[in-house]
């Protein structure tokens, strides 16, 4: 294990510390008329998304990262009389782990400092155009209440001060740890501006990040951006964490997508090289479509030599040669590989980028050249088992957006049946999280002993938010 409190140099090394945010009451305030403005495809049922879905995620993370908080206590934690107190950041019975770190707790703790509180209240009120009277009232709130207001927009059910920020459950997008540096995001959408501001205050002011405070990288707007047309995408500097993958200590991938601009990718690479954080960076431009959003909706890593990806970007469809011409032809855009552009840059040789013909070629190269896998050993598990229309349907519900707790042990949604079958065919054990938790609690299984396992998580409501467990995690420390 690395001798750091904050250090990530892999997508699959054993997860030791992660930043998460459990669904808050703001999710329950998303209305149909504002859902897409707030980046949701649908409205979700808050009670279900908490108790029947996300709470299982928290419990599983604790078993892997901080087992003393959970082992032997599940029955008491889930007893009806406790009303989910174990999961509430402002409750005395909150789990309070130093390894499964709750974002709301970090915010509450920095708000104890009156100077930080005053600055953050003023900044949020400026973004949200609050009156001076409201700003003064907010200064009177205790830290726990104020943190709740910043997330959900309301101190209680009777008053709403400003809109909620329901996307904060996707903690990966607010920043990414690259080795011992932190790359802060610049969100594309107005609905996420408050997230970026709160995250910046936490990363600069909370003691957990003290040793890394001088290693925070912020992107800035291009010079004279305010004189350029506001609707010109190339002029914008926008980046979200779902478009950044740390595949080795020397190599980072940065996507150019619906949410991350070319200018941001170029600027991030320049700064990472200047600070000697990595020696190699690859830009992966994917189609600018809501279907994909970030590169981690198209592929994620499972093992050093195993990746899950959308088959549309597989070499099997090079040049539009489809195995099922009739069904593929029915798709609106049957082939997207031509919309892909991949350029790899090495420090000191920026004028000589290396192009890759396909995403699959890039991932094979990473496994073989960066991670030392044997030539020809790299395998791909394809979304929906590469069967139309299940490949597209299951990619939409995040079949390619998996979080590795350790190499080969990944979390995915239970609704993606054909993808689960593809994992079984590839030799993986596929287990429901409720069964796994019962086995861990009884001692029939041990977290350290699990290998090659896809853990299926309940997803009826979570999947409506358009993000998987890769999105709902910001790794702070990996082996």
Image: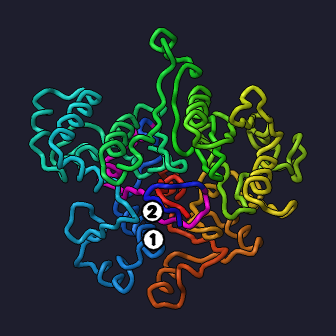
Q: Which residue is more in the foreground, 430 or 142?
A: 142
Examine the structure image and report whether residue 338 is included in the region drawn in magenta: no
Local crowd at mark 2 within 10 Å, few (<14), some, or many (≥20)?
Answer: many
State left or right for residue 18 relative to residue 450: left
Q: Is residue 199 left or right of residue 120?
A: right
| Magenta region | 10-36
Residue 222 drawn above or below residue 325: above
Sequence-wise, which precedes: disc 2 or disc 1? Answer: 2
Give the quadrant of residue 200: top left
Which residue occupies the extreme top position in the image?
Answer: 227
Q: Does any portion of residue 286 appear in the rendered image?
A: no
* Position of residue 347 in the picture relative to residue 144 (left or right): right
> What is the number of the mark on residue 65?
1
Q: CA distance from mark 2 to mark 1?
A: 7 Å
Q: Is residue 348 above or below residue 64?
A: above
Q: How is the image coloured?
A: rainbow
Residue 309 position by quadrant: bottom right
**In the figure, is residue 167 to the left or right of 310?**
left
- Between 165 and 185, which is closer to the camera in this rendering? 185
- Whether residue 14 is in magenta: the answer is yes
Mark 1: few/some/many CA within 10 Å (<14, 14-19, 20+): many
The residue tagged with tag 2: helix, strand or loop? Answer: strand
Mark yes or no: residue 220 visible.
yes
Mark 2 = which residue? 17
Percent of width and height locating residue 283: 68, 37
Residue 397 image point, x, y percent: 58, 55
Residue located 41% across and 40% down the image:
214
Task: Report the residue at 48% width, 66% height from top.
Answer: 16
Q: Circle 1 — which element? A: helix
Q: Horizontal and vertical percent for residue 433?
A: 52, 75
Q: Are marks 2 and 1 in contact (CB under 8 Å)?
A: yes
């Amino acid at each position: 294990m690395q001798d750091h409190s904050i250090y990530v140099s892999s997508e699959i090394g054993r997860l030791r510390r992660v930043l998460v945010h459990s669904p808050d009451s703001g999710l329950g305030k998303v209305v149909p008329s504002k859902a897409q403005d707030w980046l949701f495809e649908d409205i979700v049922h808050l009670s279900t998304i908490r108790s029947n879905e996300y709470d299982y995620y928290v419990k599983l993370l604790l078993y892997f990262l901080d087992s003393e908080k959970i082992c032997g206590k599940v029955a008491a934690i889930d007893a009806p009389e406790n009303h989910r107190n174990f999961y509430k950041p402002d409750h005395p019975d909150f789990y309070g782990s130093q390894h499964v770190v709750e974002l709301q707790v970090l915010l509450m703790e920095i708000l104890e400092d009156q100077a930080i509180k005053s600055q953050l209240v003023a900044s949020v009120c400026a973004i949200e155009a609050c009156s001076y009277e409201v700003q003064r009232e907010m200064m009177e709130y205790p830290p726990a209440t104020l943190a709740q207001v910043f997330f959900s927009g309301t101190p209680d059910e009777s008053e709403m001060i400003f809109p909620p920020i329901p996307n904060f459950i996707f903690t990966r997008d607010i920043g990414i740890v690259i080795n011992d540096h932190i790359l802060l995001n610049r969100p594309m959408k107005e609905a996420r501006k408050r997230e970026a501001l709160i995250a910046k205050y936490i990363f600069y002011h909370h003691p957990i990040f003290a040793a890394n405070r001088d290693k925070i990288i912020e992107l800035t707007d291009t010079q004279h951006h305010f004189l350029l047309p506001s609707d010109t995408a190339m002029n914008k500097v926008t980046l979200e964490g779902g478009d950044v993958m740390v595949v080795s200590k020397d190599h980072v991938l940065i996507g150019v997508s619906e949410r991350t601009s070319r200018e941001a990718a170029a600027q991030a690479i320049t700064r990472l090289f200047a600070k000697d954080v990595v020696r190699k960076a690859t830009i992966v431009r994917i189609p600018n479509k809501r279907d994909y959003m970030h590169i981690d909706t198209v592929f994620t890593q499972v093992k050093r030599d195993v990746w899950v990806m959308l088959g549309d970007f597989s070499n099997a469809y090079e040049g539009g040669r489809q195995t099922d011409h009739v069904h593929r032809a029915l798709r609106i855009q049957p082939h997207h590989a031509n919309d892909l552009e991949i350029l790899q840059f090495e420090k000191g040789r920026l004028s000589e980028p290396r192009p890759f013909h396909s995403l699959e070629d890039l991932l094979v190269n990473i496994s073989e050249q960066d991670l030392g896998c044997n030539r020809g050993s790299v395998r791909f598990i394809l979304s929906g088992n590469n069967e139309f229309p299940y490949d597209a349907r299951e990619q939409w519900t995040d079949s390619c957006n998996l979080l590795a707790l350790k190499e080969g042990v990944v979390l995915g949604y239970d609704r993606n049946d054909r993808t689960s079958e593809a994992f079984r065919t590839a030799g993986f054990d596929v287990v429901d999280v409720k069964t796994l938790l019962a086995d861990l609690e009884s001692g029939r299984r041990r977290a350290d002993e699990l290998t090659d396992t896809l853990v299926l998580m309940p997803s009826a409501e979570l999947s409506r938010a358009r993000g998987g467990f890769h999105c709902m995690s910001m790794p702070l420390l990996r082996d």
